[in-house]
Structure formats: C-alpha cells, structure tokens
Amino acid sequence: MNTNHLNVMSALLRLARRRELGTESSLMERFSGDAEVLRVTLRELSGAGLVERLPTHARLTMMGFAVAVAQTRPSVRARTGVSSARRAA
C-alpha cells in the first residue's frame, strides 16, 4: 500500500464520517494528485477489495473502512490515556 492509497482511503473515511459521497470532485478536493492518479488509485483499491466503485461515486468496503481507521493517527485522548470516565470524575 502506497501513500496515494492511504490518502484516498483517508479522504473516503473523512467523507463517510460527514455522510458525503466520494465523488471524483469531492475526492479531488482532498487528494493532492491529479485526476488520472486518483482514478488509477481507486482502481487498485477496488481490485484489493478496499473500495467499491459505483457509477457516481466510490466508497470504502468494510475491510477498507477497517484499514482506513487503523491508519488514522490516534486522538490526543488515546495518546494520553485519558478516558471519558476519568474526565467526568
């Protein structure tokens, strides 16, 4: 998995969290490559079973979602070990 794969999966994850479709234009706003690199990357991710390509947009598969979440940086709370229960006390 290369940087383009991780960047596209991260962009799809951010869009999914906002309940927005992963259209080519919305992905291009979040992806630093050109449109052809984006299309090739989506094709490769689709071939690996991480992304489902539909006529109007792309979306993460369940496996793709798991990989994208695992690749995100841990939150400050996770890094410091502060749980919500401890903060509430």
Image (spheres, grey):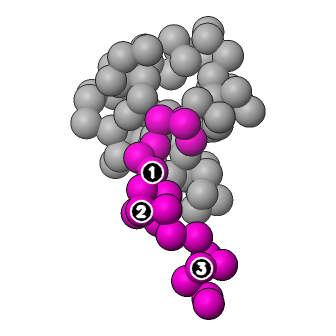
Amino acid type for the residue under numbered disc 3: Arg
Residue drawn 26% across the image and 29% down it: 33
Q: Main secondary structure of the magenta part?
A: helix
Residue drawn 50% across the image and 22% down it: 42
Q: State yes or no: residue 40 in magenta.
A: no
> How far from the left and from the top, in percent, is residue 19?
64, 59
The earlier-in-sequence mark between 3 and 2 is: 2
Q: Specify the segment rendered in magenta.
A: 68-89
Amino acid type for the residue under numbered disc 2: Thr
Q: Quadrant of the N terminus?
A: top left
For label 2, the SS is: helix
Q: Is residue 53 shown to the viewer in this render? A: no
Q: Is residue 76 shown to the viewer in this render? A: yes
Residue drawn 46% across the image and 43% down it: 72
> How far from the left and from the top, in percent, is residue 30?
35, 46
Query: Residue 38's quadrant in the figure?
Result: top left
Q: Is residue 79 above or below residue 58?
A: below
Q: State yes or no: residue 81 in magenta.
A: yes
Q: Is residue 46 above or below residue 80?
A: above
Amino acid type for the residue under numbered disc 1: Pro
For label 3, the SS is: helix
Specify the label residue 86 is tagged with.
3
Instruction: Give the residue at mark 2.
Output: 80
The earlier-in-sequence mark between 2 and 1 is: 1
Instruction: Give the residue at mark 1.
Output: 74
Query: Disc 1 to disc 3, how far (Cα)?
Result: 18 Å
